[in-house]
Amino acid sequence: MTQVSEHEARQVAEEARESTWRKPSFGKELFLGRFRLDLIHPHPEGKVEARERGQEFLARLRAFCEREVDAALIEREGRLPDRVVAGLAELGALGMKIDVEHGGLGLSQVEYNKALMLAGSAHSAIATLLSAHQSIGVPQPVALFGTDDQKRRFLPRCARTDISAFLLTEPDVGSDPARLHTAATPTDDGSAYLLDGVKLWTTNGVIADLLVVMARVPASDERRGGITAFVVEADTPGITVEARNAFMGLRGIENGVTRFDQVRVPAENRIGAEGEGLKIALTTLNTGRLSLPAICAGSAKWCTKIAREWSRERVQWGRPIGEHEAVAGKVASIAATTFALEAMVELSSVLADEDRHDIRIEAALAKLYGSEMAWRVADDLVQVRGGRGFETAESLAARGERGVPAEQVLRDLRINRTFEGSTEIMHLLIAREAVDAHLAAAGQLVDPESSLADKVAAAGRAGRFYARWLPGLIGGRDRIPGTYAEFGPLAQHLRFVERASRRLARQTFYGMARWQTRLEHRQRFLGRIVDIGAELFAMSACCVRVRKLAAEDPDHAEDARELAHTFCGQARLRVQDLFTRLWTNTDAIDRRTTRRALDGQYTWLEEGIIDPSIPGPWIAEQATGPSTVPNLHRTVL
């Protein structure tokens, strides 16, 4: 079964790639060594007609959050008050991305992401609820793949009253859906499916009214079977919410463990055909991933505000701490990185709205880079605040000081490096796209059902690999880049991006030629390749955003140029270091040390401590069958 599942996963991924391969992609071209600035400059306008509607909603959302959201209360109780959830529904926040014809607000991706920034700054659990509901919950897959009947039945409910959740992960299944165990067995008359299994980390699942559930339909002579998507009513008999999970951060998140025992789902609630579940999930995540970097950018903006205020207010050795170079460097990094994160989110969102580009790589880069850099920004803020950064907002307020939740933001942001694809998985996902782009450009894209290793091996055996265009890349180190004179002082950074893009393509090819079938196991090499691409994308987004602001907001154009210049200078140093570490690193010795550690060679190092995790965390007692615990489902009043 595992071999069939892996084959299915590869085939689905290839089908998704083929469906958008002909669309232009700035990110794909960047990894190929072709700096296609024309794809993002002039900065795309997006859905201009939806901007006014979005601004009106943002004003109402801000007023609601300022009036109704008590962040300290959410932290103390570890849940969103019912009145807040109900108020968001009344405001229309549940239907931000749903078309007007189905009762939603019909906001563009740009305005939707601004709303998530705003809501997340009030409390991160609010943005998580709204994002899980609309970015990956019922509205997105139904809008993209649902029938007209499904859209009429489910979208108006999701827009006005019902909260939805997305259920994929299982206790033994994380980023590898090939191991998915939840079964959807067709009834004898074909009118329904019976769901059995357990789903873990079901964000919104504790309070959801509608669920998108991924389950495996058994294959037979009469049916294709495979992983399939279903819309499931949360109050269907046989569904039990067994636990409400608690985490390091996001203390108001409604996340639990859901068990299905002979849950009857009408056949008309199946989204798409049998076996299309992974395709639906992957396509949904392409745009859905943009919600996380938007939330990260919003948190970074708050960190910038607090860092500025505290660095001016706090005096040490006769001067504000912001005037001391050690702290000043962190403040500069916080502000410049925040500008870059917002630039990446805005550019990726506009490209998504226009629907003329293949944004899989851009969205993945924004998610990867946003989650990593926002965490770094929050960590710097805690350091700038010193002891007050480590102290909770509630404790600060109890002492009569301003309750600044710096440590809370650090805790809340940590999960974004794991949500919807961990950093490690994102590295591999983007690397596969980049390597496949190389193979396609070389005319060596073999059987789409082949693994990455098989493709690289086939390309390596071809004696004229890259014969049509590699000479241009190899000679690229002497090629004079464009002038980019219209960008003024920022032109130097675009010239750097152009050169670095060609160098990146060469290094990717050298890695393919050196390791061939073993390339997919050189995950740290591939991770550095992807990190370089992320930095180059961020630099490009910054520069084109400055040009956009120069036309739209000339009063802040010079400030934006300075922030972009600062960020690009910092990013160039990181890129140069990453290029060096492609070939000068400790990867080999680290692998040997890891093997010895896993073999138990260093157990003596663990002596002299107590392990508080024993006897261990709660584990699901069985994969199927009726629940033995009370149903913890909480209905919003």
Image (tube, helix red, strand yellow):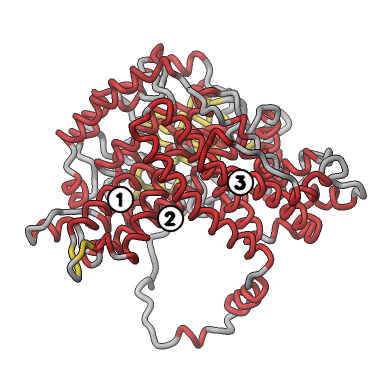
Vertical order, 493 against 601 (above or below): above
Q: Which mark is residue 516?
A: none
Please name which of the two marks, 3 or 1, marks the residue nearer to the observer.
3
Residue occupying image coordinates x 24% and y 33%: 85
Label 1 or label 2, whichever comes before in sequence order:
1
Vertical order, 323 against 542 (above or below): below
Please name which of the two marks, 1 or 2, marks the residue nearer to the observer.
1
Label 2 or label 3, whichever comes before in sequence order:
3
Vertical order, 464 against 610 (above or below): above
Q: Secondary structure at mark 1?
A: helix
Residue occupying image coordinates x 22% and y 67%: 387
Residue occupying image coordinates x 51% and y 35%: 544
Q: Secondary structure at mark 3?
A: helix
Q: Which mark is residue 620?
A: 2
Q: In the image, residue 519 lies at what x, y percent? A: 73, 57
The span from disc 1 to disc 2 (Cα, nearest Å) is 39 Å
State which quarter of the image contains the C terminus.
Answer: top left
Q: In the image, residue 223 lies at what x, y percent? A: 68, 29
The span from disc 2 to disc 3 (Cα, nearest Å) is 50 Å
Q: Which mark is residue 303?
A: 1
Q: Which mark is residue 497?
A: 3
Q: Is residue 180 visible?
A: no
Q: Is residue 194 left or right of residue 468?
A: left
Q: In the image, residue 487 lies at what x, y percent? A: 53, 36
